[in-house]
Amino acid sequence: MVVKVYVSGISGNKEVKKRQQKVLLILDSKKVEYEVLDIAEPNMEEAKEYMQNNSKLLGSTIGDPNPRHPLPPQIFNDDEYCGDFDAFDMANEIDEMEKFLKLSPNDTNTNGIQSNAEVKLENGDVSHQSASREASPAAEETAQATKDTENDPEVSENLVESTTEDLRKEETVKEKSPSQDAGDNETDDQKAENAANSSKQEAEEEYDETGKSDEE
């Protein structure tokens, strides 16, 4: 069973365009495979008549509350009618999309989305093409560089040697740091001791001189 979404790529109704865009985006987000039928195409007259004759809901909009014919988007599951945008939107809100689309759990695509339609956000038009995107040039260059590095033993060996040398330098710096600190501490202690000895010696000399003066 295939979900079919009837749309109009040249509709002058902005609300219809926004509704079509939202339907396709939601289906993509839920990984539902679907087919887009653009009733505005010259060779789609039969599909247009089928949609108008078999849609039970009119798809009324604020700008056109009483349309003469059902307005797109209209959703079918093969030949079985599912509903218009309002019914679709309500099913999405209450999390009953599978029931609305008359799908079984196995009908959803869990391996990725292969949408055959892309919604152009700037004007609401629908163009048929794959929804998969090409990787950016920067990402491709990065991936290629990584691949080249893995496939080139010489490059890999140089990277390993460079990394090893950096680690050795870091360890050497760490080993030197404690001894250097100890040397600094020893120098400070020695300075303090020398200062104390000097003060003691000066005190003794002063005492000796005082004693000699008293004797005289």
Image (cartoon, rainbow, N blue to C red):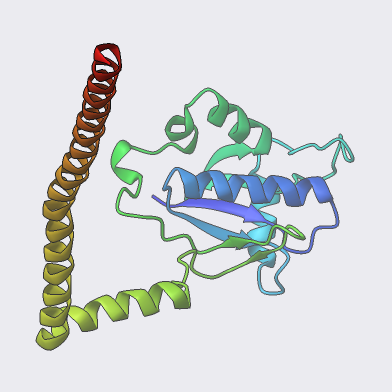
- Residue 204 falls left or right of residue 57: left
In the rendering, at what x and y percent does residue 85 appear? 66, 38
Identity of the residue drawn at 85% across and 44% down: 68
Identity of the residue drawn at 16% across and 40% down: 186
Instruction: Name which quarter of the figure residue 22 lies in.
Output: top right
**Quarter of the picture holding the C terminus:** top left
- Residue 210 falls left or right of residue 136: left
The residue at the far right in this view is 63
Is residue 75 visible to us here?
Answer: yes
Instruction: Name which quarter of the figure residue 40 lies in.
Output: bottom right
- Residue 212 falls left or right of residue 182: right
Identity of the residue drawn at 26% across and 33% down: 195
Is residue 77 visible to us here?
Answer: no
> Vertically, is 121 above or below 15?
below
> Vertically, is 167 above or below 165?
above
In the depicted view, which residue is nearer to us: 139 or 23? 139
